[in-house]
Image: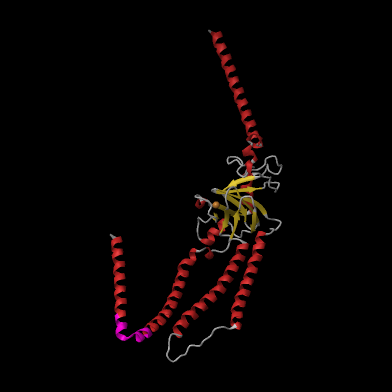
Amino acid sequence: MSLYLSIAIIVLIYVVIFQIAKASEYVSVLKGEENSRKQNNKINGFLMIVFLVLGFIGVYFCNKFLYGKTLLAQPAASVQGEKLDQMLWITLAITGIVFIATQVILFWFAYKYQENENRKVFFFAHSTKLELIWTAIPAITLTVLVIFGLRNWFFFTGEPPKNAMVIEVTGKQFGWIFRYPGKDAVFGKKYYKNIDPATNSVGILWDDKYAQDDILTEQTMYVVKGQPVKLIIGSRDVVHDVGLSHFRLKMDAVPGIPTTMWFTPKYTTKEMREITGNPNFTYEISCDQMCGNGHYSMKGVIEVVEQDEYDLWMAKQKPQYYTAFPEKDPDAAKLAAEAAAADAGAKENKEATITKKDSSGKKAMAKI
Ligand SMILES: [Cu+2]
């Protein structure tokens, strides 16, 4: 019913506009072409100013209602992110000033210099000086912005400080795998043909002596507040992208070509919950590259914690080597030994009870 009503209203509006246009055409015929054109000019000039003012009011209200929903309303959660935010604000300020100035001039001129019988058109074809000015100023400004951008780019894709922890991030259809180098702080070698989704999701070469303490986790990555983290990023299948919007960073995950970036988290997840006023806040890794039909579900989580909480978490992690070879797990061997000992103990007890029963049975027999 509401659909028919909407169609009827649209048709009605169309008919009304059509009739007004027709009527104004007849009026202009009656008034004469010249008069009608002058009047139209005035109306259009006035509408230019109305459009300008309404446009600015629209921008103001969009900003008022939508700014809080953008990530800019939250502080950048990494030291590098702050630098990028600063760059963004400088770019927005420069382009914003240019945008407002050019739009005001554009609409104001259209109104102010509308057709006037007392004014003659000034013919102006070319000015080298003017062209030099409007080419040189934007060129210099953009060069400065690009230089700042490149400096930041080389900063966070370059070498991190020495105390940085290193985590390998591997994208796959559809999820994230994180590898920590373990106690020796060196990643074991890997080879794609060794990939086994159940026990060896990144294809670690177990013969490598550095490989046996490597730790694998999926979907959640733990990092420490204030400690630089270097990510070595790769992919197991198609191109993915590690998108860290709260840290203001992103980097492609390309199969066969490792990419890197590093950042220093500024706030723990708990602190960020207070800052954003959102008790369910989590740092998210989104895949920023369309990578297949499960792309939407590639949400990873980064837990930023204090050092002691990280140490506690790390202590609970088991090297992946023991998942691949459970028989070599010293803990499992210990447990097995304990279980065997318990078994043996139980057996001994049982035998003792039987002997006891036997002897009491014999005694009973003797009495008979
Ligand atoms: Cu993806």
Stretch in magenta: 26-38
Q: What residue is rendered at 44% in x and 72% in y?
A: 58
Q: What residue is rendered at 40% in x and 79% in y?
A: 47
Q: Residue 19 vs residue 315: left or right?
A: left
Write down the quadrant of residue 195 in the picture: top right
Can you say which quadrant of the picture contains the N terminus? bottom left
In percent of width and height, residue 188 lies at 68, 45
Q: Residue furthest bottom?
A: 118
Please, is residue 305 above or below residue 15 in the view?
A: above
**Along the line of sight, the residue nearer the viewer: 217 or 252:** 252
Q: What residue is rendered at 39% in x and 84% in y?
A: 42
In percent of width and height, residue 230 lies at 65, 55
Write down the quadrant of residue 322 in the picture: top right
Please, is residue 22 above or below residue 300 in the view?
A: below
- The colour scheme of the drawn protein is secondary structure
In percent of width and height, residue 27 lies at 30, 82
**Along the line of sight, the residue nearer the viewer: 132 or 283:** 132
Q: Is residue 215 magenta?
A: no
**Along the line of sight, the residue nearer the viewer: 357 or 329:** 329
How many numbered marks have been drawn onto this rendered protein structure? 0
**Along the line of sight, the residue nearer the viewer: 43 or 353:** 43
Please, is residue 362 above or below residue 292 in the view?
A: above
Q: Main secondary structure of the magenta part?
A: helix
Q: Is residue 29 magenta?
A: yes
Please, is residue 76 above or below residue 213 in the view?
A: below
In percent of width and height, residue 129 lies at 61, 83
